[in-house]
Amino acid sequence: MAQPRQGSQRRAEEGQERREDGSDDEDGILSAFVCPITMQVMRDPVVLETGHAFEREAIARWFSECVALGRRPRCPVTMAEVYSEEMKPVMALRMAIEEWTDRRERVELRKACQWLTKAASENEALRGLDLVMRGWNEARVGKHVVRRHGMIPMVAAMLRSNSARVRLTALQAVREFATEGDEYRESISKGDTIRTIIKFIDFEDCQERELAMSVLCELSRSEMVCEKISEFNGVMLILGKVACSKERNPALAEEAEKTLENLEKCEKNVLQMAENGRLEPLLNLLIEGSPEKQLLIASALEKIVLSNDLKILVAQKVGILFAGVVENGSLHAKEVAFKVLDHISTNAESAKVLIQDGILLPLFRVLSVDSVKFLPPKLQEAAAAVLRNLVACGIDFGTVPLDGHRTLVSEDIVHSLLHLISNTSPSIQCKLLEIFVMLSSYTTTVLSIVSAIRSSGAITNLAQFVESDHQESRVASIKLLSNISFHMDHEIAQVLRTSPTLFGCLVRIIILNDTNGYEQDAAVQIMANLPKRDKRLTMELMEQGAFKYIARKVLSICRREAIDSIFDNTMLEGLVKVLARITYILREEPRCVALAREYNLGSLFTSLLRLNGLDGVQLLSAKALLNLSVKSRYLTGTPSFDEHEQKSVLAWFGKKPPGIQLCPVHSGICSIRDNFCILEGKAVQRLVACLSHHNKKVSEASLAALCTLLADGVEIAEGVLVLYRANAIEPIFGILKGNPEGSLQQRVTWAVERILRAEEIAKAASGDRGLSSALVHAFQHGDSRTRRIAEAALKHIDKLPTFSQIIDKRPSRRGSSIGSMERYFRSDR
């Protein structure tokens, strides 16, 4: 037994002395290293009592098979029975095999270096990569050799090969290297390897994309490599795009997400991620950092352009943090906080989140008069800008608590802000005025603002900004006055009456400022909401030429083919309302009559009735025509004749000469321009069309204008005939059948009674049950005056008996004392 063992050891020692270049008999060496059973080089050689060496695992399996067959164990080489199954290791042989194997693997790995070059063919490159990977995975010293001989950069360089197979194989090799540890990851990251990997990831149709993503994910586990990755421009954007592709490629998106999470370890990467829309890591650093760190991160955050979704995210995660900084932070911290808040509060939804987090109270405290004394103007302006953005979000600030029971529109809070307006710089004044503009534009808070302004007496100070040289403050002031002018018309009128220069400034804005349409529109709305029967203001408008400009402006808007702009609609309605002021003082002021004639306002208002969809314009035009038509009977002309014609008149005893057409209602020479007779210029037809308007106010105003043809002092019978020919009878009856209430019930009952004085119409209407029922309803439920008129109308259609001649079936052609409508022609707001 000793001799065979010594022979094996001697052969092993001889194998150690063979030259590694293979010049000796390599087969002889291999025969000593090869297991007779497996025919493979042994790794754990053992020797039996027969002196032959075998692989431990192989001979153990051989003995097990012999036992299974019921035979005694035998030597696989000699087939002689083995009396002892003891397997003794041969350390010298094992060491020789290991040394020979290591030497051979080194040789093979060195050969691989010759093929890992740009000049190598595809097959050579693949063979070289295969040798490297076999040495890496199987050889005992392979990893050490690969790293020591610089093979990792050589393999990484093959990523730029022209062959896709070579690139894929090289990526697989690089991934294997990267899993070994940070030392290998850093070795891979040298040169342009990372840039090449990122390029593969960026191309969606690239075969290497998924493998490259896996490699980058593995490399990103090293902090040093993370810093290198951040040096490549656009890498965060590329990875973010891949991470969002979960529907198309979930596995790839998951790898990208893991890579981004690994990259968060580097603060520089976190900033790049934030700039490319991945804000959570930066916000987490902001929340968890020290005050100094928070200040640095916040400074970086305010420079990032955020989408609306990201603004909401910032508000949700750090809104409370910034609220605390606003109230208790240092001046520098407050400055940075205001910049961030100003940025994120421009979105309505993020502004609502900030309000829920309680940002209003710290802002108000910063803007209070006591705090302003200690704050730089720059910070005051920043705080006012943030508050302005928050107010613009559209929520009901009357229900948002500020502290306890107070809200932002509570009287003392508004008083404080109004006081601050008078004691600060123009830039801050402008923003505070804009805050009030927005609060007064909401129906839920405008009354609170009006009440506070009225109780503080601040309307005069607010109006003075109309003359300000600071354009933004002037525009904001005009918009504010426009918003509250409907509720504070008398207060604003009083200010304008006492300040002619202020009034003139508003007029100049209307006449001259065509470049800023919104400012001009606001000025128009202020004028439109002033008390319309204020003769002094109306005459001041006339003196400054406002009516002439407005008349031309209305004509220019009406001549367009379509008025589809909301701005044009509101502007037109305001202009018409201002222009209609003339019609309310026609009796007192002859110059208004002359102006109405000069611009043919009767025809203008008539044409405005055709603008369907503009209810406000139609309502104002119908009321203006009502006022003009009331004036008609006082302006009706009498025919003038020459001497010959006068003789003819005398000969005819007062009869009108032939060829002179007199107005049947006013018994004189009428026209829509000269005496505003609505029988001319298609006014009656358009007013009749408006009787069926869906807006009851428009139909009532149109009815009132038509009722001037039935008023006392005109030929009522002729007026009824005009309405009959214009097909107005049925629409008027229809309004009454709708059982209206209030002033419309009185007006339409009066009109029906006048119409039923015509016997033929009364006879035809006597069979109309709907009309009878409507008159009975007015008779039973109307006020005392309406009941008297309804009673007379019921008698006209023989629904009530006539016991005396007090109610005449044939009253005077020019009316009677029953049911004069003079009081209803003085329509007001």
Image (cartoon, grey):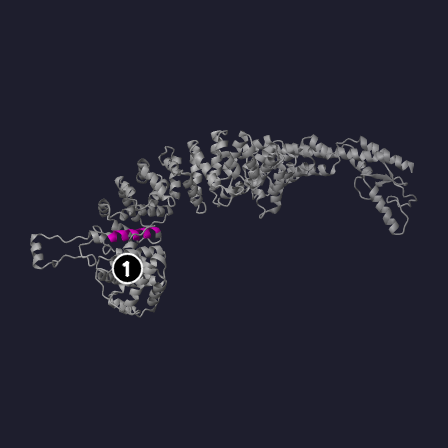
**Which residues, given as a range, are shown in magenta?**
616-630
Horizontally, residue 377 falls left or right of residue 529, namely right
Measured as percent of width and height from the top left, residue 119 is found at: 61, 34
Mark 1 element type: loop
Give above or below for 96 relative to 39. Answer: above
Residue at the outermost right position: 83
Measured as percent of width and height from the top left, residue 167 is found at: 62, 39
Please tell me whether the stretch drawn in magenta is mainly helix, strand or loop.
Answer: helix
Q: Quadrant of the N terminus?
A: top right
Quick one: 177 or 790, which is closer to the camera?
A: 790
Is residue 520 one of those drawn in magenta?
no
The residue type indicated by label 1 comes to Gly
Quick one: 274 or 779, which is closer to the camera?
A: 779
Horizontally, residue 722 falls left or right of residue 782, namely left
Measured as percent of width and height from the top left, residue 484 is found at: 39, 43
Horizontally, residue 431 falls left or right of residue 203, namely left
Q: Which residue is mark 1?
A: 819
Q: Quadrant of residue 135?
A: top right
Horizontally, residue 642 falls left or right of residue 263, namely left
Measured as percent of width and height from the top left, residue 530 is found at: 33, 44
